[in-house]
Amino acid sequence: MELVHEFTFTADLKAPVAVGPGPFGDRTIFEVIGGEVTGERIRGSIGTGGGDWILAGADGYGRLDVRLTLHTHDGANLYVQYFGVIEYTPAALSAVAGERSSEYEEHYLRTALRLETGDERYAWVNPTLFVGEGRVHPGPIVEYRVYRVT
């Protein structure tokens, strides 16, 4: 098994909506309002209307539940869904607060992505497993390096 870098993307987020503590943790919602995708086979932009529903636990980790739409440079639309985990280290908390960017190695921010499309040019993404590593920038903006699992 190998990991092959497929693309990098940024997602611009609206200010968070705090749902607050509930029976499963402290829920926060970030609306996705745009972004950019760069890669050899997949490049384009991130559309509006997606979201990141984060559930912060007492263990110092947040559980990510994200959905967004990727619009390729050549007119295809890809649905992207991923689940993941972010470790709330001091670097991650500073980045989320808008104080500075975090680096990939400063916290555990990993995702398992599923891509779907009906566009035959990108049909290869439908049966493919992707994983990602992320970091956070002021804005808030998240950035992921996404790898195809071979």
Image (cartoon, helix red, strand yellow):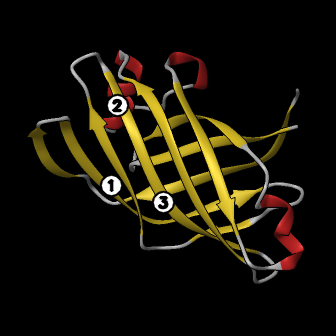
> Residue at (14%, 50%) from the top-left corner?
19
Q: Position of residue 57 (x, y in %)?
A: 25, 26
Q: Depth check: 97 or 144 in front? A: 144
| Dot 2 amino acid type | Gly
Mark 3, residue position: 67
> Residue at (49%, 28%) from the top-left corner?
102
Q: Earlier in the sequence, mark 3 or mark 1?
A: 1
Q: Position of residue 89 (x, y in %)?
A: 37, 17
Residue density around tag 3, few if under 14, some if 14–19, many if 20 or more, within 10 Å: some
Residue density around tag 1, few if under 14, some if 14–19, many if 20 or more, within 10 Å: some
120 left or right of 77 in image: right
Mark 2, residue position: 62
| Quarter of the image that includes the C terminus | top right
As measured in the structure, the alpha-carbon distance from the residue carrying label 1 to the one carrying label 2 is: 13 Å
Label pair 1/2, CB-CB below 8 angstroms: no
Q: Earlier in the sequence, mark 2 or mark 3?
A: 2
As measured in the structure, the alpha-carbon distance from the residue carrying label 2 to the one carrying label 3 is: 16 Å
Mark 1, residue position: 30
| Dot 3 amino acid type | Arg
Q: Up-down: is 70 above or below 9?
A: below
123 left or right of 77 in image: right
Closer to the camera: disc 1 or disc 2?
A: 2
63 left or right of 146 in image: left
> Residue at (32%, 43%) from the top-left corner?
54
> Residue at (58%, 52%) from the top-left corner?
10
Q: Provide the secondary structure element on which disc 2 rests.
A: strand
Q: Position of residue 87 (x, y in %)?
A: 41, 21
Q: Depth check: 141 or 30 in front? A: 30
| Dot 1 amino acid type | Phe
Q: Quadrant of residue 93?
A: top left
